[in-house]
Amino acid sequence: MRPQILFPLFADLTTIKGVGPRLAVLIEKVARGARVKDLAMTAPTGLVDRTRRLSISEAGELGGLVTLEAEVEKHIPRPTMKQPYKVRMRDETGFLHLTFFNAKADYLHRVLPEGTRRVVSGKAEKFASEVQIVHPDLIAAPGEIEEADLLQPVYPLTAGLSAGVMRKAVKGALSALPDLPEWIDPALQAREGWTGWRASLEAMHSPQSGLELEPTSVSRRRLAYDEVFAHQLALKIARAERRARKGRALTGDGSFVAAVLKHAPFTPTGAQLRAFAETKTDMERGERMMRLIHGDVGSGKTFVAALAAAHAAEAGVQTALMAPTEIVARQHAGVLKALLEPAGISVIALTGRDKGRVRAELTDAIASGAASVVCGTHALFQESVSFHDLGLVVIDEQHRFGVSDRRKLTLKGQAPDVLAMSATPIPRTLTLAAFGDLDVSRLDEKPPGRIPPTTRVVNAERLSDVIEGLGRAIAKGERAYWVCPLVEESDVSDLAAAEARHHMLSEMLKVRVGLVHGRMPAREKQRVAESFRAGEIDLLVATTVIEVGVDAPDATIMVIEHAEQFGLAQLHQLRGRVGRGDKPSSCLLVYHGKLGETARARLDVMRRTDDGFEIAEEDWRLRGSGDPLGLRQSGLPDYRIADLAAHSDLLEIASEAAAYEVQKEAMFDGERSEALRVLLYLFERDEGVRLMRSG
């Protein structure tokens, strides 16, 4: 049950004075929610400083945003409907006109009565010899306004929602704030100089300077810490509960693993053997494994998964590998067959395209246990698929699957172990933020003998030279990729389209050119991918569908057009499609137009290094805490105030503080526990805890 103290915060926006149903709909758009707390946690994006007080003559000379006090001398109704209504004001230095278009006369008489003094604020301009303010932003009697009222926070707005109305609504939301029990450790609070939650929220909404709008301001840091602490606490509770829940100890005699190692076509790296040792230790425990393996392109995650599947087979249980696309699922099946079948372990693939008798045979093999390892897509967790004894679930590119997808698959077995894989090296900050409930293994070595691709940055003005060079390389027997961001030409974009490039390159080069993109039927994509892999296609034109999936180990050239449009992690993924064999390879990053500062920095990083972990950190630094890896659905919270790039130190502190709270025996007893419960409910991590239990 949600604590009663939070009821005012979870109340509907319409409970705020002056906010009716129509206004609530508009506020909901910018506050990203329909409750009082959503509005209270909507941070200002700017500050209007009206503290510049001038006389009328100074306002005429200096112009700009001014605040002045003067006497309302006379109302001048508009002579015709096309002309404005004016109000003449005077002080000891001269006069000015307040100018209004479409304003109601009775309203203006009410707020600007003749013969009274008024404080007005707005943009002063001089037309001919006359000073005027068109539609002043602020009108008040001198006693009604304080200096603090002249510093006005700026909020996100939408059509129909004015700045003044939004500010008034925020004020109403703040008046509903309860005093919540303190959940921050007193020593940390004292060290950081943080006030309480309510005082910090009020301070965030009444900045005294631009500096107080920065993520580094004291109030923002306090509120950011609350967000990340709530999330870390939920992750750590989920992890502790998972460890407490019974799993199965999967043990074996090592024979299958030894056979896989013996027949492997390469010598495993130290990182691969280390990651497998950690995985095996987890599997042999009586608790459910939840491990993430992430590493650079070509660091050999699939081989670690093969060793884990061999260990599972020794224990007499099945392995399911879930991949994001049919192409990837079938490629995994091909790689795992080559690695596992010499050890006597059967591997099959099941995807949506398997129908009728073929599908029935495959599902029978899964149900009977004849298939030890099953590779597939979402098709694996359909009701018609039942496993004989599912003991290990491997999830490839795990950020592409939501929690519910993972849960459906794990429900197919008896508390199966879960091994998640990501082909994108993940920055340390992000690992903590998104995967705090997982144990993590890093594959930070590449197989020996690989030659990193030579990377060059080329202006699109030299496109004809690039195409000529490509033709010469293909004539010598090399094979290449050409990547474009869009599928077909569009009126709204000048980005090179894959279909247009395919046509142009086919005409110019007279070689075997293939095309693959996301809108093609799965069977056709699979056919083209297999033709390229088999050497029947010289040049493959593609969209980023090849980022995970299309794999031709002997391809040596990668051309990425409009490289300035891609993020670093994506460029690195694409480049990783070449340089997989022992031949020298190259990557050409073709950019169009003038490069912006960030785009130039990204391309420079690509030219400088092939280290995926360094690239991931740089990507994180350059892109901030947007969504660099498409991780929103995987549990990376959509923070409202915290900025992971600016607050990474708070994430570390919050992680340690959460771990400390969770290891206490009486975590949910006493006063402190009530404060932690309020925190979790405030940030809606109560639901998060339940979801995370699903693995």
Image (cartoon, helix red, strand yellow):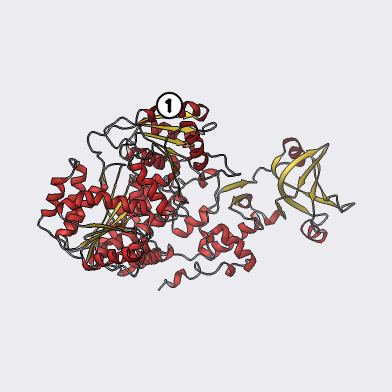
- Residue 439, given in percent of the width and then of the height, sits at 26, 54
Residue 588: image quadrant is top left
Q: Residues within 10 Å of mark 1 (few under 14, many from 20)?
A: few
Residue nearer the viewer, 357 or 311: 357
Q: Is residue 292 above or below residue 58?
A: below
Q: Position of residue 538 (x, y in %)?
A: 39, 36
Kindly identify which residue carries mark 1.
469
Quadrant where the C terminus sits is bottom left
284 sits to left or right of 35? left
Placement of the N terminus among the 4 image quadrants: bottom left
**Which residue is found at the position 25% from the left and 65% from the top?**
366
Question: Vertical placement of 673 versus 65: above or below?
Answer: below
Residue 331 x, y percent position in the rendering? 31, 50
Residue 305's spot in the image, x, y percent? Answer: 24, 52
323 to the left or right of 151: left
Q: Give the residue drawn at x 28%, y 53%.
A: 333
Q: Quadrant of residue 614?
A: top left
Q: Is residue 20 left or right of residue 281?
A: right
Q: Residue at x 39, y 42 (%)?
A: 569
On screen, residue 496 above or below 174: above
